[in-house]
Structures are given as structure tokens and as C-alpha cells.
Image (cartoon, rainbow, N blue to C red):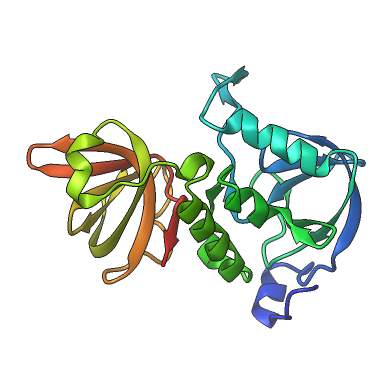
């Protein structure tokens, strides 16, 4: 299924809209990235898997983020050595020149399957044409408390969960865009999102009800959710 034609997108990206393709998966890098038979790397749209390795001082090292290995293993079971159908959105390449795609096996979108099973985080889903499917997959993971969605902060019990990682649902009262972080004020706590040189999260405005992920902390009489990624959120 090709995306609808948008003349403005075509001016930015002459390959848009790009037709679906059937390709063979040679290997799996982690929970959100695969390698095709021709060496092309494909990054799953709409999700972000916990890291299993990262580069420090120019050297790749192994890391053990929760559910990183599980997501990699599950992804291998789903696609390694199989033909997949790649479907595309408006953006078809990332900054690392990896192909961005919705990845299907036997008619099932694996992007949302991995999300629904609690193996990965949502990633900028508001911008996607398939955002409704991703939101439903996310809410399914939250409801079932699978994997990365086991811990959910409840306002009345915040004092019991200081130091833990988890999800928080709250209404946005204000958004402050600082140089190094974005501070989002809600009724019960403040969300502090590290920008790491990027702009504030897309689409988060006062009045919106959103889900955020991070580590719960407390400073004086105010609870703070510390988030290191400005893309791991969902607008209800």
C-alpha cells in the first residue's frame, strides 16, 4: 500500500511516494534494525528498541538496557532468513542513511507487533500516517503491562516509586523550552526531557494528555520524571 501523493513532500523527496518492496532479511542488528540480502540497513518506523550496543569515544561497546536482548531475539525470530514486505512513509531515510520502513510478514506489521508486545518504545508516532495503529499498539502494551510497560506511576503512590523507571500519564499545563532540556509541567509532577541538541518534542502543547517514560525523582516538594529521550512519548 503506497502513501498518498503530496506535491510538497515530492519537492523535498523525489522518491516519494515509494512503492512497497519484497526483500530477504539477511540478519538482525537489534530490535528495530535489520540487514537485507544486499547489505542495506532498514530501520523500523515508529519504534525504538532498547540499546544492546553503543559507540563511546569511537569504539562500539556492549550495553544491557532492559529488554534490549529480548527485543533483538524476538525480532530475529520474526524476520531472519525470511522475505518481508517494506512499506514506506514520507520520510524514507534517516540521518545514518538507513532505510525507514513499515516491515510486514504475512500481512502483519512487525513495528506495531513489537510495540504491542512491550519490547520497544514508541518513536515520533505522531508524525506517521499509520499513527493510529501505533497508538493502539502502545495502549495495548500499557493495558497488558508487558515488557517495558510493567511499571506505571500512579499519582497517589509516587512516594513509593522514587528511583524507578516507568510510564506516567498526565495533562500538560505548560511547556518550557530550555537550552539543554524541556520542562513539561503537569498536575502532579514535572517531566524533564533531555534535548541533546534537539528541539522540543513534536506536538506537546498545554491541554494535551500524554504518556511519558523516565526515572522518577523528587526535588523538595515536587516530583520529577527524568527522561533521556525526547521521542519516547505518546499523545492520547
Q: Nearer the viewer, residue 61 or 169?
A: 169
Residue 30 in view, yes or no: no
Asked if 93 appears above or below 127 in the picture, the reply is above
The quadrant in which the C terminus is found is bottom left
Q: Nearer the viewer, residue 94 or 12?
A: 94
Asked if 57 appears above or below 168 in the picture, the reply is above
Find the residue positioned furthest to the front. 144
- Looking at the image, residue 126 sits to the left or right of residue 83; the answer is left
Q: Percent x, y for residue 197?
A: 42, 44
Find the residue positioned furthest to the left. 221
Residue at horizontal 66 percent and vertical 53 percent from the top: 113
The total number of labels drawn is 0
The quadrant in which the N terminus is found is bottom right
Residue at horizontal 53 percent and vertical 40 percent from the top: 147
Q: Percent x, y for residue 77?
A: 78, 38
Residue at horizontal 85 percent and vertical 65 percent from the top: 20
Asked if 206 appears above or below 230 in the picture, the reply is below
Residue 7 in view, yes or no: yes
Q: Percent x, y for residue 19?
A: 85, 68
Q: Percent x, y for residue 153?
A: 30, 46
- Looking at the image, residue 37 sits to the left or right of residue 187; the answer is right
Residue at horizontal 18 percent and vertical 49 percent from the top: 156
Amino acid at each position: 500500500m503506497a502513501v498518498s501523493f503530496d506535491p510538497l513532500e515530492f519537492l523535498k523527496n523525489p522518491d516519494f511516494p515509494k512503492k512497497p518492496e519484497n526483500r530477504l532479511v539477511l540478519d538482525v542488528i537489534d530490535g528495530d534494525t535489520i540487514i537485507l540480502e544486499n547489505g542495506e540497513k532498514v530501520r523500523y518506523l515508529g519504534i525504538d528498541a532498547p540499546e544492546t550496543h553503543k559507540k563511546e569515544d569511537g569504539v562500539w561497546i556492549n550495553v544491557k538496557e532492559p529488554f534490549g536482548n529480548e527485543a533483538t531475539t524476538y525480532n530475529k525470530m520474526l524476520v531472519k532468513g525470511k522475505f518481508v514486505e517494506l512499506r514506506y512513509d514520507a520520510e524514507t531515510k534517516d540521518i545514518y542513511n538507513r532505510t525507514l520502513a513499515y516491515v510486514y510478514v504475512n500481512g502483519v506489521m512487525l513495528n506495531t507487533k513489537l510495540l504491542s508486545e512491550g519490547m520497544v518504545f514508541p518513536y515520533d508516532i505522531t508524525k506517521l500516517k499509520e499513527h493510529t495503529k501505533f497508538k493502539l499498539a502502545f495502549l495495548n502494551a500499557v493495558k497488558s503491562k508487558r515488557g517495558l510497560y510493567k511499571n506505571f506511576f500512579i499519582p497517589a503512590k509516587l512516594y513509593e516509586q522514587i528511583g524507578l523507571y516507568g510510564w506516567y500519564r498526565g495533562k500538560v499545563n505548560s511547556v518550557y523550552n530550555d537550552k539543554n532540556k524541556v520542562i513539561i509541567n503537569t498536575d502532579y509532577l514535572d517531566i524533564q526531557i533531555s534535548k541533546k541538541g534537539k528541539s522540543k518534542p513534536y506536538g506537546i502543547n498545554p491541554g494535551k494528555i500524554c504518556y511519558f517514560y523516565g526515572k522518577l525523582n523528587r526535588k523538595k516538594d515536587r516530583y520529577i520524571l527524568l527522561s533521556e529521550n525526547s521521542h519516547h512519548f505518546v499523545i492520547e
